[in-house]
Amino acid sequence: MKKNVKLYGIIACFILVIIAVGSYVYHQQQLPKMVFEKQVVEVELNHAYEVKDNIKSYYRSNIEDYILKADINYAKVGDYTVEFDHKDTHQCFSYVIHVVDKIAPEFDVVEKTIEQNQEIEASTMVENIIDDSETKVYFAEEYDFSLLGDIEVEIVVEDESQNKTKKRTILHIIEPDLLAPEITGVKDRTIDQYEKFDLMTGISVKDNRDENPHLEIDDGGFDSQKVGEYTIRYIARDEKGNEKIETCKIHVKPKVKSEGKVVYLTIDDGPSANTRKVLDILDAYGVKATFFVTGNGSDYRSLIKEAHDKGHRIGLHTYCHQYKQVYSSIEAYYNDLEAIGEMVEGLIGYVPRIIRFPGGSSNTVSKNYTEGIMSFLSNDVMEKGYFFYDWNVSIGDGGSYKNADFYVNQTISQSSGVSEVMVLMHDGFGCEESVKALPRIIEWFQREGYTFKLVDEKTRGFHHRVAN
């Protein structure tokens, strides 16, 4: 009896195993399946691949039932897993994409010429490299660059995956370059002052090997606006450092002045900080001017003496430059004139006899304070031994506060065609733009052939029509 029970048990267990295995096999047959053409797919570097093309067949599913998981860098050699994960069963099917680089580089070679014993990089003899990765270029072997003549060299271009391509070309080895460039056209010249002259006029440079030799010019401070003799040095260098220097002289001669063309440059309302700038400009151009000074700018009065000592002319303008005070009466005018005269005498040792009325002799503002005062003073000052001067050209800076370009244009438009010019400008406080305009104003008169003169007792009147 006990034996039968044991046998029955074994039989029952065997039946259960059979049922379980059958159930598992049946269940597996009901699950989705995906079959690939290849488990490893090779793809060339930088060539993309459609991962679904490797699917051979499906069972109990279609492609929409799967989530694709693939992070593939086709620009980098390596193995990348492609996974298809079933949305419902989460069964995962996968294969590998093997990104490879099996294509050797393509390139062209060129011939080169070097000097004896000169080093050369192989890369300089290669162009138009085509490859999907970084490459390096080198000679297939060591070559002797000390022998003159032509040698055949083999150049290797190798990519990151050790794919190599070799090509041969010719290297020409010649004797070292010891010749300096040649400079032609360098010669002594004489030009007129203010003449526009290019230091490269007629100059050329060439070299036996260097197609673009460097040319440097040491102009010796050349300035066509200033009379003098200038030494010009032309320095040519080739790529090997061979150097040639050619030297010439350029003589800037004074421009012949046009007969009768005279300019009197007169500057009112100083001294101030601007007076120093004006003096420096006049020095730079070798020009003398006449300053009609005031009692303003007490901190800068030493500049009046400096201007006098430099050969400029000092005239009297006004001590206070207050119209209400100066023209309040004839006595008030002479008190102001005496005050500025004493101040200037203390600086330069005498009282100048040339004067300029505040606002000029034609001013009408004086009428607000004393009727007919200008008609009286314009005659009376001369009887007292003074010589007054107005102007026939104003740069327009008398309180207009325009820019330097305006002042230059004003001067040119008013002076053109006028043979004798007395220019009015100012160097008082706030006249910075006038100072900026001064160099161009001087240059224009110089180009036009004017002679700069100082105002003195013999200078003709330049008198305005008296309006009060």
Image (cartoon, helix red, strand yellow):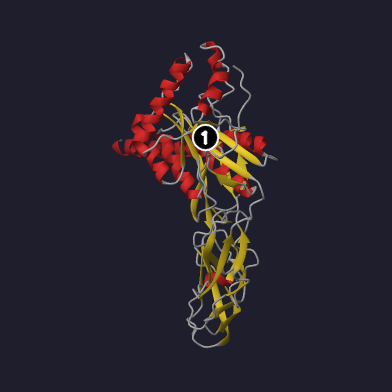
Question: Which residue is located at x 63 percent, y 49 percent?
Answer: 447
- Can you say which quadrant of the picture contains the C terminus? top right
Front residue (pair 316, 207): 316
Query: Would you call the spot at circle 1 few (<14 residues within 10 Å), some (14-19), or many (20 or more)?
Result: many
| Residue 353 percent across, percent down from the top left | 47, 34
Asked whether residue 27 is in view, the answer is no
| Residue 172 percent across, percent down from the top left | 58, 82
In this view, 189 is above or below 257 = below
In this view, 387 is above or below 160 = above
Q: Quadrant of residue 154?
A: bottom right
Asked whether residue 3 is in view, the answer is yes
| Residue 131 percent across, percent down from the top left | 58, 61
- Can you say which quadrant of the picture contains the N terminus? top left
The extreme left residue here reads: 2
Q: Is residue 154 left or right of residue 2?
A: right
In this view, 97 is above or below 2 = below
Q: Secondary structure at mark 1?
A: helix
Number of numbered markers: 1
Dot 1 amino acid type: Ser
| Residue 59 percent across, percent down from the top left | 60, 40
The extreme right residue here reads: 417
Question: Which residue is located at x 67 percent, y 50 percent?
Answer: 259
Q: Which residue is mark 1?
A: 434
Front residue (pair 284, 95): 284
The extreme front residue here reads: 383
Front residue (pair 314, 255): 314
Front residue (pair 384, 369): 384
